[in-house]
């Protein structure tokens, strides 16, 4: 038999017990590792409905791949920069046409997937890269010399 308190409600012990039981059922969407540990963090997005595929499952798998590649591209942009090529045409002091091309080229090693999830039609991948913990930098002969590029910690969104 349940006891009622002075206000006519059941004991708080039952409420706390229920909350403890239900708290194990809550889905947590937290990163695997802390974002603060990384010098570079990138986010890639891809829509599932825009992907090629005969079924929704195939479209989702393609969106997962596309969002991961987009996150890697953004990470390469942060580490190596973006090459811009611009062309404009002016006639009689009026802009006739304008073109802008971008190019990113680089090798990204040691990046870790921090989170991967979807929200409605978007699939999202978050990557992190810590240049100081890369294995090839630890063991390299130039690791303590001035030849290593020191990169300022930045987060781009």
Image: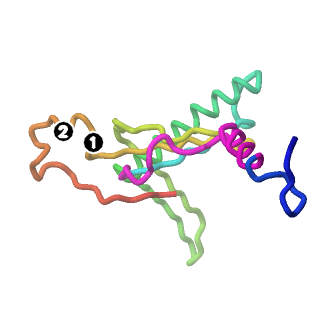
Camera-side residue: 138 or 49? 138
- Quadrant of image for the N terminus: top right
Residue found 72% across the figure and 37% down from its top: 50
For the question of whether residue 118 can be seen, the reply is no
The quarter holding residue 27 reads top right
Residue on which disc 2 sits: 138
Residue at the top extreme of this rendering: 54
Return the x and y of residue 114 as percentages of the image width and height.
49, 41
Camera-side residue: 77 or 68? 68
Asked if residue 35 lies left or right of residue 56, the reply is: left
For the question of whether residue 76 can be seen, the reply is yes
The quarter holding residue 118 reads top right
Residue span colored magenta: 14-39
| Tag shown at residue 133 | 1
Q: Given contact means CB atoms under 8 Å apart, are the residues at marks 1 and 2 in contact?
A: yes
Q: Is residue 90 magenta?
A: no
Q: Under tag 1, what secondary structure?
A: helix
| Mark 1 crowdedness (10 Å alpha carbons): few <14, some 14-19, many ≥20 | few
Residue at the bottom extreme of this rendering: 93
Residue found 13% across the figure and 49% down from its top: 147
């Amino acid at each position: 038999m349940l006891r009622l308190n002075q206000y006519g409600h059941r004991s708080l012990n039952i409420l706390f017990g229920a909350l403890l039981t239900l708290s194990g059922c809550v889905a947590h969407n937290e990163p695997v590792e802390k974002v603060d540990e990384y010098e570079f963090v990138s986010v890639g997005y891809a829509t599932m409905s825009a992907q090629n595929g005969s079924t929704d499952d195939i479209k989702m798998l393609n969106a997962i791949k596309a969002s991961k590649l987009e996150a890697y591209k953004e990470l390469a942009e942060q580490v190596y920069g973006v090459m811009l090529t611009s062309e404009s045409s002016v006639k009689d002091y009026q802009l006739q046409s304008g073109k802008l091309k971008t190019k990113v080229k680089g090798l990204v090693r040691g990046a870790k997937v921090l989170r991967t999830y979807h929200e409605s039609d978007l699939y999202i991948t978050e990557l992190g890269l810590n240049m100081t913990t890369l294995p090839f930098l630890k063991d390299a002969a130039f690791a303590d010399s001035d030849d290593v590029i020191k990169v300022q910690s930045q987060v781009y969104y």
